[in-house]
Image: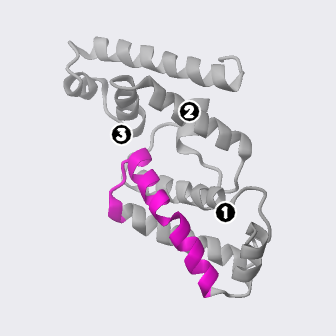
Amino acid sequence: MTKQEILNRLKEGSNEVLSVVYKQYREEFINWSVSTYSLDSDDAKDIYQTTIIIFYENILMKKLTSLNSSIKTYLFAIGKNKIREKLRESGKVFPSNDVLNEAFIYEEETVDTEKEHLYDTFRLCLDKLGDPCKSVLISFYYKNFTMQEIAQVFNYKNEATAKNSKYKCLQRLKDCVFAKTGTAQQ
């Protein structure tokens, strides 16, 4: 069944098709939410439920009549926004003032393929960095650790050493992202 046929069947109120869509992406969404955003499994399940409801309501209210992206991409974009809301409520959102932060938190509700590509590139480069760089950057930007906390957690000599390490890791990440996207650093 094509994505347009799925949307049409859902618009007609097909619970069977809704159940298929729900089951098709559930585990992947939960695993992605837990690994990418460090959500606990229960929160990830709740957010997926909300995501499916929003998706279905958008179809019924004719806000969503066709898709340029896949259903999965659309669902994950909704989910990213719900995750971001959850993280903001718990104080775990970091500033979104540069392109890397924008890629990490991805705030568009509608799917923007350029931002989606940037987000995917960012995640790939972050994974490529490996530890301790990946963990240091996530601790600082995502978990809002202070330099003092990072120094303690990662056994750096002092805050200045932690700050220097974070800076070098961020530069490596930027180099990777900009090399893969073909844009110049600002």
Residue 81 visible here = yes
Residue 165: numbered disc:
none
Residue at left offset 39%, top offset 26%: 130
Is disc 2 placed on a helix, strand or loop? helix
The span shown in magenta is 15-42
Q: Position of residue 25 (x, y in %)?
A: 53, 64
How would you rate the neighbour count of disc 1 (Cα within 10 Å): few for under 14, some for 14-19, many for 20 or more? some
Work out whether residue 114 or residue 87 is closer to the camera in this orientation and state it.
114
Q: Mark 1: which amino acid?
A: Ile
Q: What separation in Å lies between label 1 and label 3 (alpha carbons)?
A: 30 Å
- Image height of 85 relative to 171, above or below: below
Is disc 3 placed on a helix, strand or loop? loop
- Return the disc, 1 or 3, that comes first in the chain's sequence: 1
In the rendered view, does 5 fall on the left or right side of 160? right
- Where is residue 58, by image quadrant? bottom right
Q: Position of residue 46 (x, y in %)?
A: 42, 68
Q: Position of residue 63 (x, y in %)?
A: 75, 71
Residue at the spot of label 3: 143
Secondary structure predominantly adopted by residues drawn in magenta:
helix
Residue at left offset 41%, top offset 66%: 45
